[in-house]
Image (spheres, rainbow, N blue to C red):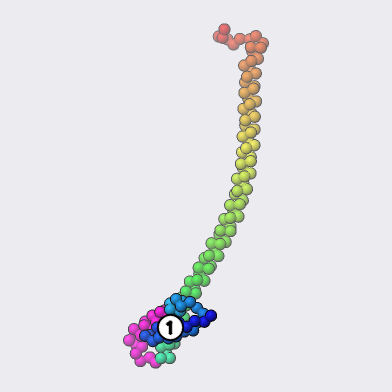
Amino acid sequence: MARKVDVVICGKVITLKSNEEEAHLQRIARYIDQKMAELTGANTTAAIDERVRTLLIALNISNDYFKVSDKLARIEVTKEKYRDEIERLQQENALLREEYDALKTEHSALQAEHEEYIEVFDNVKKSENILPIIRGERKAGIR
């Protein structure tokens, strides 16, 4: 629904009819008023007719627009680079997680094997200590 909004530009009240929010329209009006004040502030504009002044203001506003547009384009390029880098890092992270899980499984298997060897070693050691006793042998110096 279109609404009427009064704005002030160069001291003149202008009624706008728009679907935009009033705060947005007031912001635009202040921006244009500021641009008009910048142009009027230069002493060279006293002799400039209304059409030329309007053209100069349009050029200033267009300049601002293109600067912001170019900056936004650079930000979009940077954002895409970051997005690509994030995707690459996520893939690398997934591969590293798989490698970690494989190493963890291998570690568990090696640890179990190690424990088996310790058990076998302990059993062999016990049997070596028992064999001389079973055979009735004594170690030298032991009574």
Q: Is residue 110 left or right of residue 75?
A: right
Nearer-the-camera pick, 79 or 50: 50
Image position of 17 with respect to 81: above or below? below
Task: In the displayed orientation, state which residue is furthest to the right.
Answer: 135
- Predominant secondary structure, magenta span: helix
The percent position of residue 119, horizontal first and vertical second, equals 63, 26
Nearer-the-camera pick, 85 or 46: 46
Q: Is residue 77 left or right of residue 134?
A: left
Total numbered badges shown on the rendered structure? 1
Residue position marked by numbered label 1 in the rendering: 6
Nearer-the-camera pick, 28 or 132: 28
Amino acid type, residue under disc 1 in the picture: Asp
Q: Residue at x 65, y 9 (%)?
A: 136
Magenta part of the chain: 29-49
Q: State yes or no: residue 41 in magenta.
A: yes
Image position of 86 with respect to 118: above or below? below
At mark 1, the secondary structure is strand
Residue 45 visible to the viewer: yes
The percent position of residue 107, horizontal first and vertical second, equals 61, 38
Q: Residue at x 57, y 7 (%)?
A: 143
Image position of 119 with respect to 92: above or below? above
| Residue 89, quarter of the rendered image | bottom right
Q: State yes or no: residue 4 in magenta.
A: no
Q: Residue at x 48, y 77 (%)?
A: 21
Q: Mark 1 Cα within 10 Å, few/some/many (few <14, many 20+)?
A: some
| Residue 122, quarter of the rendered image | top right
Q: Residue at x 62, y 31 (%)?
A: 114
Nearer-the-camera pick, 38 or 93: 38
The percent position of residue 81, horizontal first and vertical second, equals 54, 63
Q: Is residue 122 left or right of residue 10?
A: right
